[in-house]
Amino acid sequence: KAGVTQTPRYLIKTRGQQVTLSCSPISGHRSVSWYQQTPGQGLQFLFEYFSETQRNKGNFPGRFSGRQFSNSRSEMNVSTLELGDSALYLCASSLQVNSPLHFGNGTRLTVT
Amino acid sequence: KNQVEQSPQSLIILEGKNCTLQCNYTVSPFSNLRWYKQDTGRGPVSLTIMTFSENTKSNGRYTATLDADTKQSSLHITASQLSDSASYICVVSAINSGAGSYQLTFGKGTKLSVIP
């Protein structure tokens, strides 16, 4: 069974630009969640989707948004990028809410 | 406020030795506690998940314990191998009854280095 796939693996953007990251969950998993990971803050929850509906949202500004499609694939978008948005963005899928998370290997975003 | 504290922040041990990582939490209402292993440059991988009624759970050389009364968990690694070098993250799930969902609180992890 294929794992969680995130694309692209690496991304370099300039301040003020926007970026879209993609996540394909494990087949059959309907819950997809996104996380930001930085050395100082660890893993921080961004949002969670289940069957195309956002069920939970973390404490991030409105520049961070996401969506889930009918095939459970998900995208997250960050607009007006800031230097502080440089991080590893991880996507995870699970069979149902509150079951073990299966993480992708992340997208490393660098904002210059 | 829900919090998860892990100790130590980092640890260096010799190959073949055992070690124990700690996780203290102030999360309620408690649903479950999870341990993940994250290799450098990779996403975290689930090691164990324990509910309120489970005191111990093993996954190969990894054994997690949970004391729900003191709100403490530990991850014990037996006969360490070089491949155990990674960050170990403790995650606690709380029931978010108002939203009918669950909230995860992440520790900042313990970075383990196993040296030959």
Image (cartoon, rainbow, N blue to C red):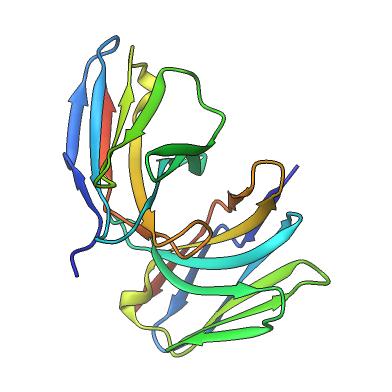
Q: Is residue B116 left or right of residue B66?
A: left
Location of residue A67 with respect to A4 vertically, above or below: above
User: Is residue A42 in sight in this rendering?
Assistant: yes
* Residue at position x 37%, y 75% in the image: B84
Q: Position of residue A38 (x, y in %)?
A: 43, 39
In the picture, residue A34 is in which quadrant? Answer: top left
Q: Is residue A70 left or right of residue B71?
A: left
User: Is residue A46 in sight in this rendering?
Assistant: no
The outermost residue toward the right is B69
> Which corner quadrant holds the C terminus of chain B?
bottom left
> Which corner quadrant holds the N terminus of chain B?
top right
Location of residue B31 with respect to A106 vertically, above or below: below
Give the camera-side residue of A22 and A87: A22
Q: Position of residue A10 (x, y in %)?
A: 18, 38
Location of residue A93 with respect to A107 vertically, above or below: below
* Residue at position x 41%, y 17% in the image: A63
Please count the marks in the image. 0
In the picture, residue A96 is in which quadrant? Answer: bottom left
Q: Position of residue B33 (x, y in %)?
A: 61, 66
Q: Position of residue B71 (x, y in %)?
A: 77, 66
